[in-house]
């Protein structure tokens, strides 16, 4: 016997999905009063049969689903439609949810459900505390630095385990109503937007600081809710692209330094005072898994090498044009351009290190051994304890910015100068946040310049000392995480 063909529609991410049929797909969310269905499923005639004693019903349906329904789809006459807006309160109904709809169009349903959940608690009546929640743990990216900076601004901070944000949010909000939740790269938030809308309904400000390629981050998000989230990006190249894809509030917030970790009181690392030093990985963790299915062909490698030879860095903007990708979201197609960029970045770093001369020391993973067999290779070091002393002790610290961030900067662009060290960095437009007169002797535009630049630096110690002093003052006064916290707080004004 042939199965009946299920109704199929495109979900929020543009993927075709079937609408399952059956009473088991309707969930009673409780409440008292008239019955309100949130979605009716593929067979609207089934809904009244769940409550045969009732004569009339209300319903809400996602407009994106309604637009795809066939002409044969008919709704019983005893159903009255409610068209929701931002002020719609459904707490006066007994609410029945067609559960697949929530997965299909989360950015439509989650705000309604968040409003319902909050109306049934006393959370919105609570007084907000001068507290910030930062999802992660004490070892997570930027968490220690941000906690210290918020504490300096008079905030109490809570580091919330990301899974606890998803499983225990209402309990957490009952115990404390924070002023702000600051997520790094959407950590602690979910793919559907449930957490974000619950926090917003509770009156909590939410911001996401994307310190990596933003479209790599949101490529794993299936709901369009990210467009409603206030976004901060370390690389302002992405601002027009994010707005083009629907972001409603996005601003530039570069990285910075934490002067409790990086400062001039650090004892320099021994035996590096005549060395050019690079500290970094040859590859980031879980790279193969993240870029699964992506390709970097021989032709791609040749194109990247040719670009570098022509004094062009094959960064994300370069590959985006070359691959012709116009739609960065939804879907993961953008990761293919990202993988080509990442592989080009490895080539850029290898060539740069090969041009750094014989006085090169590299602290990093074992992967460097096959690319730099004659260099002074040393094991990875701890960011908080050993790295500051290396920056302070090296004659020249070398920086190559990830091409995944065309206008981005790295922590080295701030941390090295904060220790009183000297940095030679590849140029990106992100350096425009610093005085232009400080850049010429501290940057290179392509790897072939590195040897000449390092020779000049070594032969002009007075200039080097003066530059380090000027950079140190700029970093301390304008580019600490305390400075960034001020901008984060002003972001909502």
Image (tube, rainbow, N blue to C red):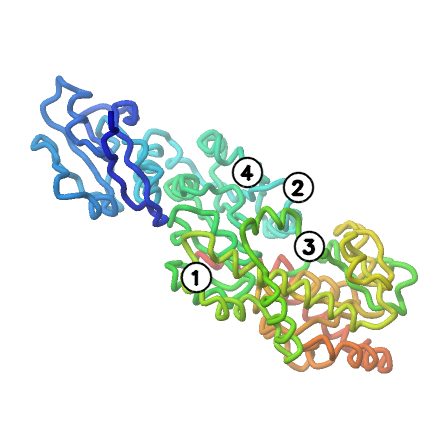
| Residue 174 as seen in the image, left or right of residue 146 | left
**Quadrant in which residue 328 is drawn:** bottom left
Q: Which residue is mark 3?
A: 283
Looking at the picture, does residue 214 appear above or below residue 286?
A: below
Q: Which residue is mark 4?
A: 162
- Between disc 2 and disc 1, whose residue precedes? 2
**Which numbered dot is residue 242?**
1
Spatial CA span between label 3 and label 1: 27 Å
| Residue 127 as seen in the image, left or right of residue 419 | left
Circle 2 residues within 10 Å: few <14, some 14–19, many ≥20: some
**Of 273 and 490, which appears nearest the observer?**
273
Spatial CA span between label 4 and label 3: 25 Å
- Between disc 1 and disc 4, whose residue precedes? 4
Question: Mark 3 touching mark 2, by CB under 8 A?
Answer: no
Spatial CA span between label 1 and label 4: 25 Å
Question: Mark 4 touching mark 3, by CB under 8 A?
Answer: no
Where is residue 367? Give x, y as percent: 76, 54
């Amino acid at each position: 016997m042939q199965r009946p063909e299920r109704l199929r529609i495109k979900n929020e991410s543009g993927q075709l999905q079937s609408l399952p049929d059956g009473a088991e797909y309707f969930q009673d969310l409780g409440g008292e009063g008239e019955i309100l269905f949130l979605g009716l499923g593929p067979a609207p005639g089934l809904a009244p049969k769940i409550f045969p004693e009732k004569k009339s019903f209300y319903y809400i349906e996602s407009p994106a689903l309604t637009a795809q329904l066939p002409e044969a789809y008919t709704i019983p006459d005893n159903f009255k439609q409610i068209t929701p807006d931002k002020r719609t309160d459904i707490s006066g109904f007994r609410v029945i949810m067609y559960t697949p709809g929530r997965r299909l169009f989360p950015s439509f349903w989650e705000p309604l459900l968040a409003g319902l959940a909050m109306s049934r608690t006393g959370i919105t009546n609570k007084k907000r505390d001068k507290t910030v929640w930062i999802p992660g743990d004490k070892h997570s990216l930027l968490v220690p630095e941000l906690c210290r900076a918020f504490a300096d601004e008079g905030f109490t901070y809570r580091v919330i385990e990301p899974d606890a944000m998803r499983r225990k949010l209402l309990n957490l909000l009952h115990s404390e109503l924070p002023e702000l939740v600051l997520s790094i790269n959407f950590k602690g938030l979910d793919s559907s937007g449930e957490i974000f809308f619950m926090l917003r309904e509770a009156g909590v400000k939410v911001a996401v600081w994307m310190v990596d390629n933003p479209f790599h981050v949101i490529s794993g998000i299936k709901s369009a809710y990210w467009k409603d989230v206030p976004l901060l990006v370390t690389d302002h190249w992405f601002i027009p692209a994010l707005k083009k894809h629907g972001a409603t509030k996005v601003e530039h917030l570069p990285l910075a330094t934490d002067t409790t970790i990086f400062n001039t009181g650090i004892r320099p690392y021994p035996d590096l005072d005549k060395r050019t030093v690079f500290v970094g990985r040859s590859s980031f963790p879980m790279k193969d898994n993240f870029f699964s299915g992506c390709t970097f062909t021989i032709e791609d490698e040749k194109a990247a090498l040719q670009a570098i030879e022509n004094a062009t860095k094959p960064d994300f903007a370069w590959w985006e044009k070359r691959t012709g990708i116009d739609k960065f979201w939804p879907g993961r197609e953008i990761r293919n351009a990202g993988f080509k960029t990442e592989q080009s970045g490895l080539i850029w770093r290898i060539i740069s290190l090969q041009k750094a001369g014989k006085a090169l020391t590299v602290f990093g993973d074992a992967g460097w051994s096959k690319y730099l067999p004659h260099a002074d290779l040393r094991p990875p070091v701890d960011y908080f304890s050993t790295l500051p002393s290396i920056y302070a002790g090296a004659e020249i610290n070398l920086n190559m910015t990830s091409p995944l961030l065309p206008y981005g900067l790295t922590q080295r662009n701030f941390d090295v100068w904060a220790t009183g060290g000297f940095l030679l960095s590849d140029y990106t437009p992100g350096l425009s946040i610093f005085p232009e007169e400080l850049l010429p002797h501290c940057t290179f535009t392509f790897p072939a310049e590195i040897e000449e630049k390092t020779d000049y630096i070594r032969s002009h110690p007075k200039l080097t000392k003066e530059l380090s002093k000027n950079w140190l003052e700029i970093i301390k006064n304008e580019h600490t995480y305390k400075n960034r916290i001020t901008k984060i707080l002003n972001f909502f004004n």
